[in-house]
Amino acid sequence: MSAIIYKGKSYHCQEGETVLACLNRKHADVPSSCQSGVCRTCMMRAVSGKPTPESQQGLEPGLVEKGYFLACVCRPTEDLEVVLSGDDVMSYIEARVVEKIQLSDEIVRVLLSPLVPFGYRPGQYVNIRRTDGTFRSYSLGSLPGEDTLDLHIRVVPGGEMSTWLANEVRVGSTISIEGPHGDCYYSESTQAERPLLLAGSGTGLCPLWGILRDALARGHGGPIRLFHGSYSRAGLYLVDELKALAEEHESFSYHPCVDAAGEGEDLMVGRVDQVVIEAIPDLQGWEVYLCGHPGMVEATWNAVRGAGANESDIHCDPFTPTPASTS
Ligand SMILES: Cc1cc2nc3c(=O)[nH]c(=O)nc-3n(C[C@H](O)[C@H](O)[C@H](O)COP(=O)(O)OP(=O)(O)OC[C@H]3O[C@@H](n4cnc5c(N)ncnc54)[C@H](O)[C@@H]3O)c2cc1C
Ligand code: FES
């Protein structure tokens, strides 16, 4: 059993327990969101002791060297003295809500203007923090040269953050954002002739919208195929904009798909993982981006690996929800 020292108090971490669960069991109030090592809301720094390698996976080498780790996935194997990550790595900035646009019955576009310069790559994500300490992650569909950050929020019935953003946050008010995070973005090192597969479900289209337009703006010459899946036509959005991009760029094709037949001949039918493989059975040499529902991301990851895509060429952004009963 390891001891966790935090704010001058010692806590006993039970067998298999994470640092986050241990501290919050004792009401230490460490912030968290995804609780699966994705969003970085729970990032801490070990002042003494060594965090587990799993809890530092995906962090930049500079952060690892300084002892930063993700408390929600750290099951300590030795005593640790820890502090919450400082402003040097988790600095919140204010952003003004410039506009809110209904993209479909259940998806709202929120356009934000950061009050200080904010650098990011299209497809990365930010954490939004409410004053009551609730955190959630949202992807960026905008390009850095554009005036505003483009967020697509699916309104989850009863969802803390999404209903707040959709119904309560007013245009003209400011909210706190932190980031950017994530490595699911178009990279300059991608060969311009290489085929790109973009596949997502629901608001997984948001990062793909950013990645797609970034690739086109950077002159990507290889074929780009985007598959966007939803349970029905009502869940698809930006359809006209994507069709217009496909008309403008010969190299780009857009494939909207729905779960069941009967929604129109222009839609493919089937789950995203099935539709992708039916359309492109051989994915050797393709660079792949998968965003949205975690189950869809996992199923499509397995499918594209089976079709020959290299593991190192698959970039994923699963929208892992915050576990129930935490904020
Ligand atoms: C890296 C990352 C990027 C993300 N990007 C986006 C984005 O661009 N757009 C976006 O809309 N969301 C995105 N999400 C999801 C987002 O962070 C929230 O989880 C989501 O908005 C729900 O939060 P909430 O507070 O409204 O609901 P909560 O209060 O957390 O949940 C309310 C209830 O709904 C359930 N629930 C939560 N999410 C879902 C879901 N998707 N489907 C079904 N039930 C659900 C919960 O289990 C709970 O029972 C992203 C998540 C991650 C980790
Ligand atoms: S990374 Fe720990 S809560 Fe998200």
Image (cartoon, grey):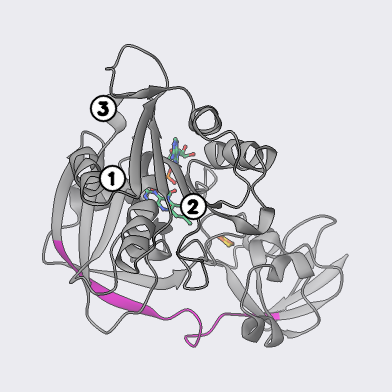
Percent of width and height locating residue 75: 78, 62
Above or below, 149 against 164 in this view is: below
Residue annotated with mark 2: 195
**Magenta region, residue range:** 82-98
Q: In this view of the protein, which residue sits in the foreground, 161 or 109?
A: 109
From the image, state whether disc 2 or disc 1 is nearer to you. Answer: 2
What whole-number distance in Å separates the C-alpha atoms at marks 2 and 1? 38 Å
Say if the magenta span includes residue 219: no
Say if the magenta span includes residue 87: yes
In percent of the image, x 15 and y 53: which residue is there? 100
Task: State the SS at label 2.
Answer: loop
Q: Residues within 10 Å of mark 1 (few under 14, many from 20)?
A: some
Mark with earlier residue (2, 1): 1
Residue annotated with mark 3: 234
Task: State the SS at label 3.
Answer: helix
Q: Residues within 10 Å of mark 2 (few under 14, many from 20)?
A: many
Task: State the SS at label 1.
Answer: helix
From the image, state whether disc 3 or disc 1 is nearer to you. Answer: 3
Quarter of the rendering occupied by the N terminus:
bottom right
What is the three-letter code of the residue carrying label 1?
Thr
Percent of width and height locating residue 7: 64, 81
Q: Is residue 191 left or right of residue 122?
A: right
Mark with earlier residue (3, 1): 1
